[in-house]
Image (cartoon, rainbow, N blue to C red):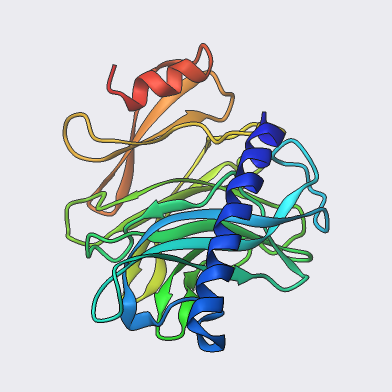
Amino acid sequence: MRRFLRDWRKILTIGKTLRAVALAALAGPAAAAGPGVICVEAITGADYALPTTRYPHGALGDDEEWGALVVGVALKMPCRAGASNYQATLPEELVFEDVSPRLWDMTGDGKPEVVVVESHADKGARLAVWGIGETGLERLAATEFIGTRNRWLAPVGAADLDGDGAVELAFVDRPHLARVLRVFRWVDGQLVEIASLSGVTNHRFGASVIEGGLRDCDGGPELVVADADWRRLVGVRLVEGVLDTRDLGGIAGPESFEAARACR
């Protein structure tokens, strides 16, 4: 299934890349890396490109990861209306070890940033936030690497989890080993860890999807994950700086996570 999705993303990426090259050719050499920053209204999409086998971990079911990030943007006046792309290519020691980029509003301005999982050849995974900065597409912030090769993390969701006006982001650190939910807050352009919870997960080794996520049914945003044994659904809320849990029922399959996220 993951290879099927990859093949479709490759087709889309080819189209995006050709469009970006065409725009660059029309605008001249200065536009080769993307449109001028003052021209960008908002990020509208993102995808991975440049498949690579230089980091054969296999956490997501195969040995192929990604070497580049392509981000689509909407343009605004005084430049011109329309759309364009940026592309960021990672150095050899890094890959995007991920299912797909996420468009999550981390700054609270109503416009999305791009949240991804990056893995280092020697240091394992970290979570990173990319966006349009002063020089174009930039890594705006990132957590520390886990510290060991072939150690991964799985994003859960991002929202103002406790109603204080700041955006929090959650992921499961080593969902197959440590199984620790970590919550970071966006503070002055940095990711600051504010809470953690042991004994939960959202991914099984070799699966091509990350289960669970974020919902808002009653009482505010709630994270949906699984217990360590993958038998029970767990709802997690951030309350006065503490992660509060409740049982959401048994797990019969992927449909259980989907139903929980849909508040059923």
**Residue 128 image offset from top left, x and y in percent:** 51, 64
Q: Is residue 36 above or below residue 114?
A: below
The one nearer the camera, 107 or 13, is: 13
In the image, is 162 to the left or to the right of 250?
A: left
In the image, is 193 to the left or to the right of 144?
A: left
Q: Quadrant of the C terminus?
A: top left
- Residue 2 image-quadrant placement: top right
* Residue at the image point whose x is 49% and y is 76% from the top: 34
The one nearer the camera, 223 or 63, is: 63
**Residue 159 image offset from top left, x and y in percent:** 29, 51
**Residue 52 image offset from top left, x and y in percent:** 78, 55
- Residue 119 image-quadrant placement: bottom right
- Residue 78 image-quadrant placement: bottom left
**Residue 60 image offset from top left, x and y in percent:** 69, 39
Q: Is residue 198 above or below residue 159?
A: above
Farthest residue in the top direction?
252
Q: Quadrant of the N terminus?
A: top right
Any part of residue 179 in sight: yes
Any part of residue 33 in sight: no
The one nearer the camera, 63 or 59, is: 63
* Residue at the image point whose x is 55% and y is 69% from the top: 22
